[in-house]
Amino acid sequence: MATTDGDKELVQLLLTRWRNPETGLDLATEVVYDVFLSFPDSERPNSVVVVLENGTQPFISQQKEKNLTADQNDPAVVRPYAAYAPPGNPQGKLVYANQGKLSDYEELVQNGIELNGTIAITRYGGAGRSAKAINGAKFGVIGVVVYTDPADINDGIVSEEQTYPNSWYMPPSGVERGSYSDHFGDLLTPYYAAKDFTYRIPEDNITGIPLIPTQPIGFEDAKILICNVQVNVYNHRRIEKSSNVLGLIRGSVEPDRYVLYGNHRDSWVHGAIDPSSGTAAMLEITRVLGKMLKEGKWRPRRSIIFGSWGAEEFGLIGSTEYTEEFFSKLQQRSVAYINVDIAVFANATLSVSGTPPAQSVVFKATKQVRTPDNSNSVYENWKLYFNRNSSIYGVIPRLGSLGAGSDYAPFIHYLGITSMDISYTYDRSKTSARIYPAYHTAFDTFDYADRFIDPGFTSHQTVARTAGNILMRLADTLILPLNVTDYGEMLEQMYKAADHEDIVADLRNHNISLAPLQAAIAQFKSAAAGLDQRIASLQEEESPSPLHVRMVNDQLMLLERAFLNPRAFPDEYYYSHIIMASRSSSIATFPGLANAYSSAKVSGNWEKVRQHLTIVIQAIENAASILEPVAQ
Amino acid sequence: MATTDGDKELVQLLLTRWRNPETGLDLATEVVYDVFLSFPDSERPNSVVVVLENGTQPFISQQKEKNLTADQNDPAVVRPYAAYAPPGNPQGKLVYANQGKLSDYEELVQNGIELNGTIAITRYGGAGRSAKAINGAKFGVIGVVVYTDPADINDGIVSEEQTYPNSWYMPPSGVERGSYSDHFGDLLTPYYAAKDFTYRIPEDNITGIPLIPTQPIGFEDAKILICNVQVNVYNHRRIEKSSNVLGLIRGSVEPDRYVLYGNHRDSWVHGAIDPSSGTAAMLEITRVLGKMLKEGKWRPRRSIIFGSWGAEEFGLIGSTEYTEEFFSKLQQRSVAYINVDIAVFANATLSVSGTPPAQSVVFKATKQVRTPDNSNSVYENWKLYFNRNSSIYGVIPRLGSLGAGSDYAPFIHYLGITSMDISYTYDRSKTSARIYPAYHTAFDTFDYADRFIDPGFTSHQTVARTAGNILMRLADTLILPLNVTDYGEMLEQMYKAADHEDIVADLRNHNISLAPLQAAIAQFKSAAAGLDQRIASLQEEESPSPLHVRMVNDQLMLLERAFLNPRAFPDEYYYSHIIMASRSSSIATFPGLANAYSSAKVSGNWEKVRQHLTIVIQAIENAASILEPVAQ
């Protein structure tokens, strides 16, 4: 867990490995930040208590998970809590509020249920963790209990006999811990690296965390809660020192171009899967590369930077502080960021999220790597599970889109660096589990990983081979393996989602035309096609000029930066990527435009739609101009 | 004047020159924007009228300048007006309000003078044009008259015999026109290029322009104004098409690196000096370079882009729209921006404003160019007039700092591109004129330039030679002639201004230490010195690797970008350069810090001081990390 002795030991382990004279890197450094965290009180455990009218307490929630495999008894196991939830002891009638979405609370009110002074019990999923409490407080709710529903995590299975340690399903006493914060990065130092001298906003100015006591529990406890309960929360918030560990391999030809690869180091409890499956993959990659390096057999064309991020579980803190501290350098020089956090959710198929320029390099790599059972290429197997019909390529594997679920978020949303997130995952026809059931509980152990997630650790190997292959291609290929034409396909898709009969009619009624947007996308596609042609000619040259190659590579590398506009979403921390920002509207078009349109339908504010249309067009035109011949 | 027939003729002239087969450039393009301008009514002239109690009008201000050299009778001469001032006919007692600063109005109130319902008469200078009206309106003033005081512009000279056409001084009927807008760029499209489809903010949301009728007059009229006056303003605001003309010379080795050179094309009236002295220098430079190019004798290493900007007089509109439209490309690829607007104010000495990395290349060029009378180098002569004692170099010429007075503003403040502004100017011991006296009047004519500003046009030649020399050095030198060590000296100076006994005591009382700032500056200086050493070794190599040179050049070119923080000054359009932003505080340290400190002394808001200290430190650390070895 972040900043504990275990964390410090891992920092030393990474430093030792990365400084190993036979298998280490060129350089390994520890960088420390002072970050704002939240912990349960060691003396007074949090609880949810049933209180009768006469004051007696016939039930108190379990203070920790049952000791099923001895791992749960480890003194380092943190008791279940909602990080950043404030302390307090509110007492009131318990109301079931489904997933704690705004619409869930509204439905209760519409059905005549008085929410003022109640404790809401909600299940995980549907809304962010903190949203459940933030939404509830708006309706007068004074405390929130969050439980994991077996229907969401266990395919409905609830008995001790059928759950871990007898299967991968969550035992009845399992509790999902988590950060109850909407934002990422250190909450007291948005946009600034959290050093000792850094300005910190007043704690009262923090937004996006619960204002009412909140506590997660297991389904064993959840099912017997009725009537009047009291939520007892004794969490503390305090500033702690948290480390990133950085490892470096210097590039031989272009040391000033960085390929970034990272994962967080901290877990909630043992974290065998989250994050150590990813850390294991990273350490194996660095060992292999380090060995080739130290033996003098290989040095990449570009520099590679490995990051072991601290305090991710509290809100991607280490990676965010890193992007804040080295903003300019990273934005000017980074080729791409590869994230492997939970390397293996399950053994069925690869899963990749990323922006369009990542697609081609991921495809190339996955065609070279075999599935864990060696029955197929990772690419072909992946295509069976996740696919789409591309207007350019026909049926191909489908890349997901990057939200803010792991450390790639600051790299793509704040810095505009082409990013990807890689893992092995489920066959969705076999389970509907929201996530692997031991997630964030005391049951995410080596035993669990070994027996249920990845027996033989063959999927771990597959992910490491895939990510390593991508990494080496990005670091070594003369012309960067980023395909910008693929961005054109996404822009076209987003345009089509907006170019719907009903939407167009609404826009026309307010004198708004999509024609300039269509023209900008056409300009982009034509610029991308032109660059592709010039790249093809360049690749035919016997000894292309180094500066000519560099020029083209800069166009490929810096394209994604043109989609950033730090003034586009003034109310959202960090988000400034016009194409990838978060979207609440159900219309699958450009997020700012979609959100503005959906709210204009209610509020009548069509000015905002006009404004976001201009923001999108200007970003696409800027992106096109990056790809066009540089002197025209 | 912007968007008139004369402007269109000049666009054609530039296109013809830059497309000339013998002396033209590689490419010349016209780019058109739809920009928001303000003009007087052609039917109803603006006026300031004395109104007696019986309603008679014994005096009406002159509607245009006296016809002294026939140039004033040209039908294209726009009548004097305050661009963007609203129409209206307010009438009230006239109050003399000095320069129309906030403190001027406050002093009147403190002396018991009722301002409500009055017309204020103010002189040019001391406060921005629009500020005079914006400030007055806060005190109930209903109209503003602005005149040019002979003490400020004419060294006190007022008679017709001693003024133009008999000397360079402003005739009694001369009126300074001007844009009464605080911001730069098209007022309806901040941050977006003003194209036909672009979102425009509602006109009522424009800030920084007068809300009350305002009119400039000459001192001949000003001196007889007493008692009750009426200000009659009939200005219109409307959107007009305004052009930039862009000229390009393709770079041979690094076509994707841009050296930018520009000046505006529009004037208020004839504009022989403002801006045509600069345009003449630009056309001579492009003619000479174009000739070498077409004869196959020369092609620069890097690309050169020339810009003839439209509608500068209304608020740097053409240049700002250009930086908005091509934001990403310009920010990624621009080496520097050279501005020559008013090339010659007078014949005494060179004057240069710019950021520190420009200093060394300007020095090198000016040592090679002779003064107009061929008596000295421009450098040595310059040093006689403007100098300072540098901690590194001893006594050297002094570069001024860049405000927002001409088209360099969006390049430095919005894009963070190293910029410089070059002209020949006065011997300050011979005149205290605020600016050359015919500025923005109908007397800024060829005759005026020929007889009083630069007889023989030798200073024009000197400026063109100097600017051309700088331009060629930036475009051709293998290692960019930008010295980053010189930024260290400026940071040190700014630190010293903050490290004053009284300030340090105030800060200590609020638990704020400057030590981390000092450490960051030390880090910067050490990084700069290290880079200088690596450059020196590189220059000794016989055939340095092209990519090694490019790496170092990217560090030099992109340093200035690290000082940008688009979130540092949320209330100020475009300003985002931590070192160069505008400062209202009298303490000559980092502007955000200085302003926050000065207001904390009044408001007690020391949080803002803490915040800006962090912003400055983080920017300097980022800048240092740009200069450090790229893989460490």
Image (cartoon, coloured by chain):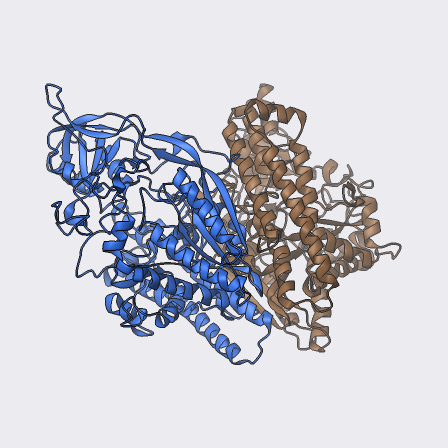
Chain colours: A brown, B blue
Question: Nearest the camera: B351 or B452?
Answer: B452
Residue at the image position 78 percent from the left and 52 percent from the top: A453
Q: Quadrant of the N terminus of chain B?
A: top left
Rendered view: A252 above or below A405: below
Q: Position of residue B356 (x, y in %)?
A: 38, 64
Q: Position of residue A122 (x, y in %)?
A: 63, 34
Q: Is residue A99 left or right of residue B401?
A: right
Q: Position of residue A566 (x, y in %)?
A: 50, 46
Q: Quadrant of residue B614?
A: bottom left
Residue at the image position 60 percent from the left and 19 percent from the top: A111
Residue at the image position 55 percent from the left and 80 percent from the top: B541
Question: Nearest the camera: A297 or A38?
Answer: A297
Q: Position of residue B79 (x, y in %)?
A: 28, 35
- Work out whether residue A218 can be spotted: no
Q: Is residue A377 left or right of residue A184?
A: right
Question: Nearest the camera: A378 or A224?
Answer: A378
Rendered view: B253 above or below A384: below
Q: Quadrant of residue B526?
A: bottom left
Question: Nearest the camera: B292 or B172?
Answer: B292
Q: Is residue B17 left or right of residue B84?
A: right
Q: Quadrant of the C terminus of chain B?
A: bottom right
Q: How many marks?
A: 0
- Work out whether residue A605 can be spotted: yes
Q: Quadrant of residue A199?
A: bottom left
